[in-house]
Structures are given as structure tokens and as C-alpha cells.
């Protein structure tokens, strides 16, 4: 009998040390090696997010789960290269540890890391058998794509951000989302009682993930079970990170366009952007894309998306996003609501805001799309720098992922800008 999915989220192989300087690759671990691979080294739908299986699973999602493709368009946007030796750049962390960027990348479970400066690729490295053509699960970076598409529909007049969710999805009228405004969902300031602790098998997020599995209730049904509001904050008062929020936005996108999320992403962004490889969405077993964490794309196409936003929506000879939407994404706001809910210094010291499904970093003019286990698209407007990172970290959240990565990216941006 298979272990419950919640238990699998918490287990590791005892043979793997998460504190080693250079984590073992999927090949070194023997994952999916052999005909057939030993049972203990097989990556499945139940364990692909669990370390160490995620070292292989995050690059091979469509081999273990149902997915839907996001096709490319009729042209590929060229990436010009201007190599800069960033591997030897020394960075000193606040605790006085000094590392080079190259050393840190090897120790941080990195699968791919790409830096663009002033539109050119200046640094690109791959690890763990990843290649430029590898599609990698981005987890919550997906939220930023969902938010961007919703902003485009608002601009087109198909969605009113001041309207209530129930206007577009009456099925959610009696839930915690029903009387929240679309803008509350975009900024994650709706009032809801929800636990998103990735290490708690009883948390709401575990039930959400189980809804994705065979025999699960599916995303639409899971959203309709979330009826309890927060007992302290009303809609619009405080930021509270809740993955179902972009799932609601995904439902709105499908409802007003009559198209799948994959079709919308292809038509609105992927084709005009000039993406090099198709992307794909992880589906529940009812055929619904996971709008809050299910998109898999290549490192280069993630960088293209960030560069397009940096350039006020212009890319590949086209205006992919309007200038207004791109500038709205880059303009940080809601700082006064950001740390009210959380008793954690990270909220304010590392990040300082959240809006439209994008994070803002403190102390710099930078926004980012972030995903658990170390996925990033970083856009620094002052330094003209975009960074994309794919990672199969053993932890969902940690100081290495949420603190050190930001510090490394800021240091690179500062170095390049000078």
C-alpha cells in the first residue's frame, strides 16, 4: 500500500545528507537509473516533490503527472550573449560568511542559473543534468504568470478588479472568496482562515495537494470547501499568502475567456514573447491546470519573460504587455499591509511588499516571482538585471532559499550595475 501523500511530503532517504557542501545529483543518487530502476530509486507521482526524488522529479513532471502543453509561436526571440565571469564573484553574507557565486550555486541544489544584464545573457550555468531545453517545475512562480494574465484581462475590460469574485464564479459565493474583490485576490489580502505550512501534514495546503492526486476531489471542489474567514482581518486589510487565491484567479480567467489556462498563456504571452520551448501545466485528474504552482518552463524562457517586463512589455519586436501593465508589475505597493499577519522578520527585512502575485524586495528596486524549493524570476529595474533560477532544494523554504538567494541576486545586480 502506498504511503499517504501527506506523509511522503515529509520523508527523506536516510542516505542523503541535506547539509553537504555539494548535493548529489539525480544521477549520483541513482534515481530512475536501470531497467527497471530499483523500487527505492523510482520517482513517482507520490514522491516527486519529496527529497531526494525531487532532484529528478522537478525536471520530469510530465513523466509522472498529467499535463497540458503551452505551445510556442511562429518565432523565437534571440538571446544575445556577453559573458561575464560571475562564478568568481565573492559575496559576503550578513553573518560574515564569504562565498563565491560559483561555490554557492553548487551548494544550493541549483539546476540552472541565468543572468541577463541590459538585455544580454552574461552568465548561464546548468547542473544536475539540466540543459537549456529542460522544462522545470516553477511552483509558485506560476502565480506571477496567472496575475499577469489577469491584469491583461482587466485592461481589456473583461474583468473588473473592483468586482466581487462571485460575479465571475457564482460557485464560490458561499466561500471565503465570494465577497472578496478581484483586487484582494490579486494582492492576497482577502480574509481567509488558511494554513500553508508545507511541513504540517494537517495543513490546508496538504489537502490542496491531495486534491491534485488520483481520486482527489480536484481543484474546483477543493476551493469550494474553503469557507472560513480570518477572525482578525477583513478583506483588503492584511497580506496573507494563500495558494488558492491564484487558483480562484485561474477560474476567473477560464470563465471570462472560455479557454484553458494553457491556451490563454500561449495566446497572451508565450507566442508573442518568442518562447524557445513549449511550457506545460500540471493538471489535476479532472483536467484543470494548477494556476498557483503548476507551470513548467525552461530557464531561458523564464528569463525572456522577466526581460520583457523589465523592458516595459516590449520584446521580440512586439508589445507583449502594455507599458501600463508592465510598469504596474514593477511598481511595488502594499508595504503597509505586508507584515501585519506575519510575526517574522523576513517580512520587511528581505521582502517588503506583495502585489498582483509579485513580491517586492526590500532595499532595492526589484520585484520577483518566487517558488518553493528555490525557483526565481528576479527583475531589478535600477541595475537592468534579470535573473532566473531553477532549483531542486531539499527544503521547501529555508534561509538558503529565501534569504541567501536574494542576497546573491542583489550582489550580482550591484556588481553589474557598477
Image: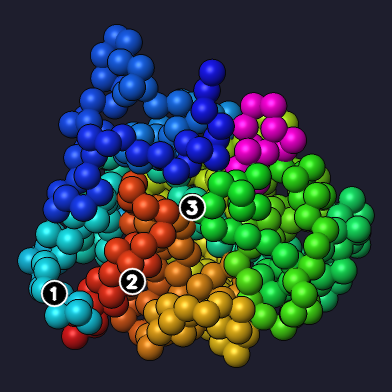
What is the C-alpha distance between the residues marked 3 and 1? 28 Å
Give neighbour class at mark 3: few <14, some 14-19, many 20+ (Cα, 10 Å). some
Residue 76 visible somewhere in the drawing = no
Q: Which residue is mark 1?
A: 97
Q: Dividing the image into 4 quarters, which one contains the N terminus? A: top right
Q: Nearer the viewer, mark 3 or mark 1?
A: 3
Asked which secondary structure carries label 2, the reply is helix
Task: Look at the image and say whether residue 223 sits in the magenta stretch.
Answer: no
Asked which secondary structure carries label 1, the reply is loop
- Left of 387 or right of it: where is 206? right
Above or below, 132 against 26 in this view is: below
Which labelled disc corresponds to residue 199? Answer: 3
In percent of width and height, residue 131 lies at 27, 40
In percent of width and height, residue 38 lies at 30, 15
- The span picked out in magenta is 208-218
Which residue appears at 82% of the width and 49% of the height? Answer: 224
What is the C-alpha distance between the residues marked 2 and 1? 13 Å
Which residue appears at 14% of the width and 80% of the height? Answer: 96
Q: Which residue is mark 2?
A: 403
Which of the two discs, 3 and 1, labels the residue nearer the N terminus?
A: 1
In percent of width and height, residue 355 lies at 60, 75
Amino acid at each position: 500500500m502506498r504511503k499517504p501523500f501527506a506523509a511522503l511530503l515529509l520523508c527523506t532517504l536516510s542516505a542523503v545528507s541535506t547539509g553537504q557542501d555539494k548535493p548529489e545529483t539525480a544521477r549520483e543518487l541513482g534515481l530512475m537509473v536501470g531497467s527497471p530502476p530499483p523500487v527505492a530509486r523510482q520517482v513517482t507521482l507520490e514522491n516527486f516533490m519529496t527529497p531526494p526524488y525531487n532532484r529528478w522529479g522537478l525536471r520530469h513532471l510530465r513523466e509522472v503527472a498529467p499535463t497540458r502543453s503551452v505551445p510556442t509561436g511562429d518565432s523565437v526571440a534571440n538571446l544575445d550573449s556577453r559573458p561575464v565571469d560571475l562564478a568568481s564573484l565573492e559575496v559576503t553574507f550578513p553573518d560574515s560568511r564569504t562565498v563565491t557565486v560559483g561555490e554557492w550555486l553548487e551548494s544550493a541544489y541549483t539546476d540552472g542559473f541565468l543572468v541577463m544584464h541590459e538585455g544580454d545573457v552574461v552568465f548561464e550555468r546548468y547542473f544536475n543534468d539540466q540543459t537549456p531545453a529542460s522544462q522545470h517545475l516553477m511552483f509558485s512562480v506560476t502565480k506571477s504568470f496567472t496575475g499577469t494574465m489577469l491584469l491583461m484581462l482587466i485592461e481589456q475590460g473583461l474583468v473588473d478588479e473592483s468586482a466581487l469574485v462571485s460575479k465571475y464564479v457564482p460557485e464560490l459565493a458561499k466561500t471565503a472568496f465570494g465577497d472578496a474583490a478581484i483586487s484582494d485576490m490579486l494582492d492576497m489580502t482577502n480574509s481567509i482562515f488558511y494554513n500553508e505550512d508545507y511541513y504540517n501534514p494537517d495543513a490546508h495546503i496538504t489537502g490542496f495537494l491531495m486534491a491534485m492526486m488520483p481520486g482527489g476531489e480536484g481543484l474546483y471542489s477543493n476551493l469550494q470547501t474553503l469557507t472560513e474567514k480570518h477572525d482578525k482581518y477583513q478583506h483588503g486589510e492584511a497580506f496573507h499568502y494563500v495558494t488558492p487565491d491564484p487558483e480562484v484567479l485561474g477560474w476567473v480567467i477560464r470563465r471570462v475567456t472560455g479557454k484553458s489556462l494553457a491556451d490563454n498563456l500561449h495566446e497572451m504571452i508565450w507566442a508573442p514573447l518568442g518562447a524557445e520551448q513549449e511550457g506545460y501545466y500540471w493538471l489535476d485528474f479532472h483536467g484543470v491546470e494548477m494556476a498557483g504552482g503548476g507551470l513548467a518552463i525552461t530557464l531561458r524562457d523564464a528569463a525572456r519573460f522577466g526581460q520583457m517586463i523589465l523592458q516595459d512589455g516590449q520584446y521580440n519586436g512586439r508589445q507583449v504587455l502594455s507599458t501600463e501593465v508592465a510598469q504596474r508589475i514593477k511598481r511595488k505597493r502594499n508595504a503597509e499591509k505586508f507584515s501585519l499577519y506575519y510575526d517574522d522578520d523576513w517580512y520587511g527585512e528581505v521582502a517588503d511588499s506583495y502585489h498582483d502575485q509579485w513580491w517586492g524586495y526590500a532595499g532595492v528596486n526589484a520585484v520577483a516571482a518566487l517558488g518553493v524549493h528555490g525557483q526565481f524570476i528576479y527583475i531589478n529595474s535600477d541595475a537592468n538585471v534579470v535573473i532566473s533560477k531553477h532549483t531542486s532544494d531539499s527544503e521547501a523554504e529555508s534561509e538558503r532559499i529565501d534569504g541567501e538567494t536574494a542576497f546573491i541576486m542583489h550582489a550580482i545586480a550591484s556588481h553589474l550595475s557598477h
